[in-house]
Amino acid sequence: MRYQSYFNTAVSLIRAYDGSVPLVHFLKKYFAEHKKHGSRDRKLISHLCYGYYRLGHAVKALETAERLKISLFLCNETAGDWAALFEEDWLSAWLPTIPEKIQWLQKKYPAFTIVVIFPWAAALSEGIDQEAFILSHLIQPDLFLRVRPGKEKQVLNKLREQRIGFSQLSDSCLALANTTKVDTVLEIDKEVVIQDYSSQQVARFLSLTTHHSPLTQTTVWDCCAASGGKSLLACDVLPGIELTVSDIRPSILRNLKERFDRAGIRNYRSFVADLAHSPLTTHHSPFHMVLCDAPCSGSGTWGRTPEQLSFFTEQKITAYADLQRKILSNVLPQVAKGGYLLYITCSVFRQENEEQVQFILQQDGFELVKMELLKGYDVKADSMFAALVRKEK
């Protein structure tokens, strides 16, 4: 009866949710207003809601409860405590892999196809395995940590002492179960940075900038700093940089200061800038490197925010691409001769990625150094795009 109650609550929440705010905020508000739900209740109800939206646009004609049942079947390795909600034929079909489950579902629901989970495949960047990418939305991504330089031994020792399971993807990259509470064991931003696997791969692009000039006097501007993850990465990969950060939101820069304080980064400049509408006016430019982690659709991260699969519209791709182009137009003149622009998105759409690189290369004096779609869907991570361009001397 308890699990049926969880199921019924999730159905009511899904029917009430309209996508106008992130699902995490919607659920947080609901639980704040309904104190009867304990921590386990909140966890299971949230699990049901997130699983439901992993279906994207598949079998949307069905009732909410039926779709939620399908999502439970697809997104859980075993029926477990949910078994009482299913008839025997479902339980017998609870096969080991998602493709096997899909084959069974397609017999029961002929309208079910994986293509409509993510119906924008034609807009994807080149090189994406469409089926693997789409199916990855049915799986909760991992939590990834970047171990900061010199902290490797103490971080691994702390995790092992607390018997926290992890996989080590590199000397500095650790993968953990998404629900792992690491902030009670590790010092966030001082010892480790919570940063997705693909986002950590940006370090390879940063390292390429050392091939042409010494970096002891390099000025770096993170023009769309947001939470500051790329700035922290740049400081660790390129020690000695003179860092400048900006964002359109003053509140973000206040939060960024707190994060930099925890990370021990104090020698930097910051300012508020609306780069979509105004060119940069500061005596600190031009910069040896500009990091442009541009506002985007976030389509490479929808495994973490699957509600986007249901509420995103294709028109938004063009809207983001237009915004990115405006920002680039105001940012490119701030790159010093012989300097670099590192353009990054967490999008998988061609219009936000390769087409923007073509726009950059159409401007005088820029040449492509490296461009890559950072595929995370095969390692339970986000997918991103990065391109490094150099301005001729």
Image (cartoon, rainbow, N blue to C red):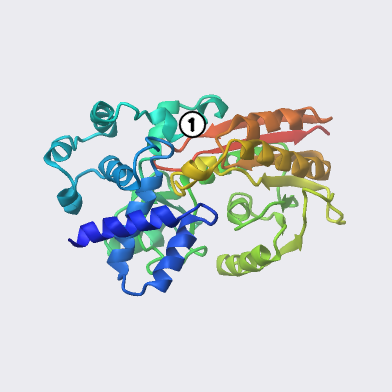
Q: Position of residue 155 (x, y in %)?
A: 40, 60
Name the residue that disc number 1 marks: 119
Q: Quick check: 95 above or below 261?
A: above
The total of numbered circles placed on residues is 1
| Residue 126: quarter of image | top right
In the rendered image, residue 339, in percent from the top left (x then y), is placed at 77, 40
Horizontally, residue 133 falls left or right of residue 387, namely: left
Left/right placement of residue 221 relative to residue 205 reads: right
Q: Position of residue 288 (x, y in %)?
A: 76, 45
**Outermost residue, bottom side:** 35
Say which element carries label 1: loop
For disc 1, the neighbor class at 10 Å (few under 14, some 14 to 19, many from 20) is: some
Residue type at mark 1: give it. Answer: Pro
Locate the N terminus and report the quarter of the image it occupies. bottom left
Residue 157 to residue 353: above or below? below
Q: Residue at x 37, y 67 (%)?
A: 185
Residue 218, image x, y percentages: 74, 50
- Does the image show residue 213? no
Q: Is residue 374 depicted above or below 267 in this figure?
A: above
User: Does residue 215 appear to the left or right of 264 in the view shown?
Assistant: right
253 vs 230, nearest the viewer: 253
Pick the quarter of the image with the C terminus.
top right
| Residue 67 shows in this picture | yes
Q: Quadrant of residue 59?
A: top left
Residue at image point 55% right, 32% down: 373
Residue at horizontal 21 percent and vertical 58 percent from the top: 3
